[in-house]
Amino acid sequence: MGSRMRDGNERDIRRLKEIYSRVVDALADVVRDLAVSEDELHIAGRFFNRLGSAGAFPSLLDLSLAMASIEGRLMHSGTRPNLEGPYYVTGAPERPDGVLFERSPGPTAEVCVLTGRVTEVGTGGPIQNAELDIWQADETGAYDYDGFNLRGIVRTGPDGRYRVVTVIPADYPQHQTDPIGELLGAMGAEVFRPAHIHLKVRVAGREVLTTQFFMADSPHLATDYVVGAVVPELLVERKSIERSDGRPMAAMSFDIELSLHDAAS
Ligand code: DHB
Ligand code: FE
């Protein structure tokens, strides 16, 4: 954004001015309506400084505004879109064998085979060579911020099917000790997001879907602090499968329906 602002073309400058002035107007209404005092503004200012130092500003914007940002897309047919969240990174490697972990999963991890079929809305025909760019937290609820563990790209075969080997993510706990957790806690809200797996789908190089699905057995489904993200059609049940070595293993299935004629994201 820094260099964009300096070298910004007319359109960027107009866009920035429009967004900034509308945000200030909307917040000024709140300040007037609720008679927010200068003391309260200063408390907020100090809070936002701490939030920024903790690297948590993107999370605050996502948890409060991302669902509004994607609202227009929710009306399209096919698999329901969902927020990208703060932890997507580009450049994840292709995983031809479908295995998303780069090191042996920890002793408490439950390995999981995730399969599904990508089809076209309406015709139900398979979409082959669709690119699924998947990212998720590990069995402790942590994303890999520096590398690509539990991130990767898999492709569908001629029958539209894909297969991924990963671990069951834990409920997302990372805000327990940061200013986001403080804010949510102070308002009596839950500090966990229910366990989920994110994915983007690209077809012929065009991004056609960003969504996430949730572990149906998470105890935090009803209290996700990203209000509106959890919907019944994005819950996925996990089945246990027997393994000869006695280690627990799970299977999950998530089918994806795409409308290739809808505008891209
Ligand atoms: C946040 C974390 C996520 O994993 C996500 O998908 C959305 C929001 C967060 O940090 O608030
Ligand atoms: Fe997430």
Image (spheres, helix red, strand yellow):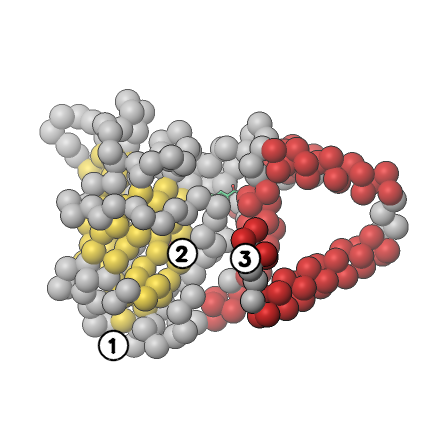
**Distance Cα–Cα, label 2 vs label 3:** 28 Å
Tell me the residue that label 3 is attached to: 4
**Distance Cα–Cα, label 1 vs label 2:** 22 Å
Instruction: Determine whether the residue tagged by mark 2 lies in a helix, strand or loop.
Output: strand
**Distance Cα–Cα, label 3 vs label 1:** 43 Å
Query: Of marks 1 and 2, which one's residue comes earlier in the chain?
Result: 1
Query: Of marks 3 and 1, which one's residue comes earlier in the chain?
Result: 3
Residue contact at pointers 3 and 1, CB within 8 angstroms: no
Dot label at residue 211? 2
Instruction: Determine whether the residue tagged by mark 3 lies in a helix, strand or loop.
Output: helix
Residue type at tag 2: Thr
The residue shown at (35%, 45%) is 135
Q: Whole-percent x and y of residue 178?
A: 59, 31
The crowding category of the residue bearing disc 3, from other C-alpha atoms within 10 Å (few below 14, some 14 to 19, many at least 20), is few
Name the side, left or right, on which 112 lies relative to 259: left
The crowding category of the residue bearing disc 1, from other C-alpha atoms within 10 Å (few below 14, some 14 to 19, many at least 20), is few
The crowding category of the residue bearing disc 2, from other C-alpha atoms within 10 Å (few below 14, some 14 to 19, many at least 20), is some
Which of discs 3 and 1 lies nearer the camera? The answer is 3
Residue type at tag 3: Arg
The residue shown at (46%, 36%) is 172
The residue shown at (48%, 66%) is 74
Q: Whole-percent x and y of residue 150?
A: 31, 39
Query: Of marks 2 and 3, which one's residue comes earlier in the chain?
Result: 3
Asked whether residue 15 appears in the rendered view, the answer is no
Location of residue 168 (image quadrant): top left
